[in-house]
């Protein structure tokens, strides 16, 4: 297998891992905050995850490995299956919110006592966030909201400190309700 094909497999596996982690974050948040918006994002991501998983398996299977290497490649396939199972579990959590099922009493108490909210905002050209990394933007310091996911076009990005924010990005964030208005103003560039 050539180095370029190997790197494609690595990149695809990282994408599977990141997507399943995003789904778990959003699913737990949707459940604890009883947010249909987040639950719907999880369902959209589930469809995307299915596509990523299929692409990943095809990459691994088209590697041209030798029979003696088959155990190693079977391990790669199993890693992909596990990330898919995590994504399926996240989708099941989100389904509780979407189907408006009565949550367990402990979860219900946690929802009632939660002081947090989840919101989304689109970054405008005029926003001071535009062109900054998440670390430079200091969104949490400015608003009390933590960016959970960046939705850019049809992709969901797990934010890291060095992730650059671009105009058009939709930031999905959670935090205390009193920071929601400041967060939306920051993203829109309004004073």
Image (spheres, rainbow, N blue to C red):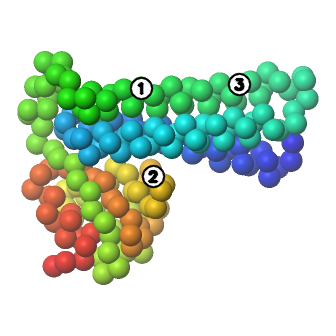
Image mark for residue 156: 2
Query: Residue at coordinates 17% horizontally, 47% vertically from top-left?
Result: 117
| Neighbourhood count class around disc 1 (C-alpha, 10 Å): few under 14, some 14–19, many 20 upward | some
Q: Measuring from the top left, give residue 87's x and y in whole percent.
A: 46, 32
Q: Residues within 10 Å of mark 3 (few under 14, many from 20)?
A: few
Residue 117 placement, left or right of 26: left
Q: Which mark is residue 132?
A: none
Q: Residue at x 32, y 75 (%)?
A: 124
Residue at which label 1 appears: 89
Q: List x then y, in percent, for residue 103.
A: 18, 22
Which image quadrant for residue 65? top right
Q: Residue under label 3, please give it.
A: 75
Element class at badge 2: strand
Where residue 132 appears, as percent x and y from the top left, is 40, 72
Q: Could you tell which of marks 3 and 1 lies nearer the N-terminus?
A: 3
- Which is closer to the viewer, label 3 or label 1? 1
Q: Residues within 10 Å of mark 2 (few under 14, many from 20)?
A: many
Of tags 2 and 3, the one toward the viewer is: 2
Q: Quadrant of residue 106 in the image?
A: top left
Give the alpha-carbon distance from disc 3 to disc 1, as whole Å: 21 Å
Q: Where residue 7 sits in the image (x, y, percent)?
A: 73, 49
Spatial CA distance of label 2 from label 3 is 26 Å
């Amino acid at each position: 297998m050539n180095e370029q094909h190997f790197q494609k497999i690595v990149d695809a596996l990282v994408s599977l891992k990141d997507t399943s982690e995003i789904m778990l974050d959003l699913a737990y948040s949707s459940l604890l905050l009883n947010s249909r918006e987040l639950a719907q994002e999880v369902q959209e991501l589930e469809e995307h995850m299915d596509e990523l998983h299929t692409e990943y398996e095809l990459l691994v299977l088209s590697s041209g490995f030798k029979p003696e290497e088959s155990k190693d490649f079977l391990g790669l396939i199993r890693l992909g299956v596990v990330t898919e199972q995590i994504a399926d579990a996240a989708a099941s959590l989100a389904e509780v919110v979407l189907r408006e099922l009565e949550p367990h009493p402990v979860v219900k108490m946690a929802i009632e006592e939660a002081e947090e909210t989840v919101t989304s905002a689109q970054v405008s050209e005029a926003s001071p966030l535009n062109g900054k990394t998440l670390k430079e933007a200091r969104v949490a310091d400015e608003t009390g909201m933590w960016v959970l996911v960046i939705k850019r076009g049809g992709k969901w990005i797990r934010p890291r400190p060095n992730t650059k924010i671009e105009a058009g990005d939709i930031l999905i964030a959670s935090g205390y309700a009193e920071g929601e208005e400041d967060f939306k103003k920051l993203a829109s560039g309004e004073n």
